[in-house]
Image (spheres, rainbow, N blue to C red):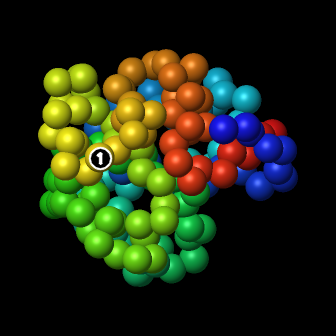
């Protein structure tokens, strides 16, 4: 996929309860040649409230892409993914699943996610850029 210039930043919703992992992704995003706007929520229920624009997220922008951790409190990543896929309004938003190791990828087989929509956590801006620009339906936005 080609990154097309835009004045609008790529809106990214990161669903991550580990503050260190969230910070690593934030730093990785800053190293990219993309303008991004990152919003972080810390559990699955907050993610769904954000996506459905429930209070306190009524004025938040719709994300262009969701970075979703699997291990979350309140609703785990697979439960969130199920709800996204079963909601016609939400299923159009690309989801990149963030995993701690490649062994966790087996849990995702039932979702038939493209390999480019799975990101192994860690500081790897080049891999993150590939994921963000190759994940189906992500509209790339450059600075």
* Label tally: 1
The correct choice, above or below, for 53 with respect to 133 in the image is below
**Nearest the eye: 107 or 101:** 107
Read off the residue under disc 1. Answer: 112
Residue drawn at x 59%, y 68% as measured from the top left: 61
Residue 84: tell me if it is visible.
Answer: yes
User: Residue 81 at what x, y percent from top left?
Assistant: 28, 58
Hey, which quadrant is residue 47 in on the image? Answer: bottom left
Residue 17: tell me if it is visible.
Answer: no
The correct choice, above or below, for 37 with respect to 2 in the image is below
Circle 1 packing at 10 Å, graded few (<14), some (14-19), many (20+), is few
User: In the shown orientation, is residue 82 left or right of residue 1?
Assistant: left
Residue drawn at x 24%, y 23% as measured from the top left: 102
User: Residue 127 at what x, y percent from top left?
Assistant: 51, 22
* Element marked by disc 1: loop
Hey, which quadrant is residue 59 in on the image? Answer: bottom right
Quick one: quadrant of the N terminus? top right
Residue drawn at x 29%, y 72% as measured from the top left: 86
**Nearest the eye: 46 or 52:** 52
Residue drawn at x 17%, y 24% as measured from the top left: 103
User: Residue 128 at what x, y percent from top left?
Assistant: 52, 29
User: Residue 78 at what x, y percent from top left?
Assistant: 20, 53
Quick one: quadrant of the C terminus? top right
User: In the shown orientation, is residue 106 left or right of residue 67?
Assistant: left
């Amino acid at each position: 996929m080609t990154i097309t210039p835009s004045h609008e930043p790529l809106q990214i919703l990161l669903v991550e309860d580990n503050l260190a992992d969230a910070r690593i992704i934030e730093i990785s995003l800053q190293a990219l040649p993309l303008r991004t706007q990152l919003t972080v929520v810390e559990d699955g229920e907050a993610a769904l409230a954000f996506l459905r624009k429930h209070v306190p997220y009524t004025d938040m922008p719709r994300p262009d892409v969701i970075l979703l951790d699997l291990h979350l409190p309140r609703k785990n990543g697979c439960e969130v993914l199920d709800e996204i896929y079963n909601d016609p309004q939400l299923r159009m938003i690309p989801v990149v699943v963030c995993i701690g190791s490649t062994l966790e990828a087996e849990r995702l087989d039932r979702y038939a996610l493209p390999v480019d929509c799975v990101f192994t956590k860690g500081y790897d801006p080049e891999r993150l850029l590939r994921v963000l620009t190759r994940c189906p339906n992500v509209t790339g936005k450059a600075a």
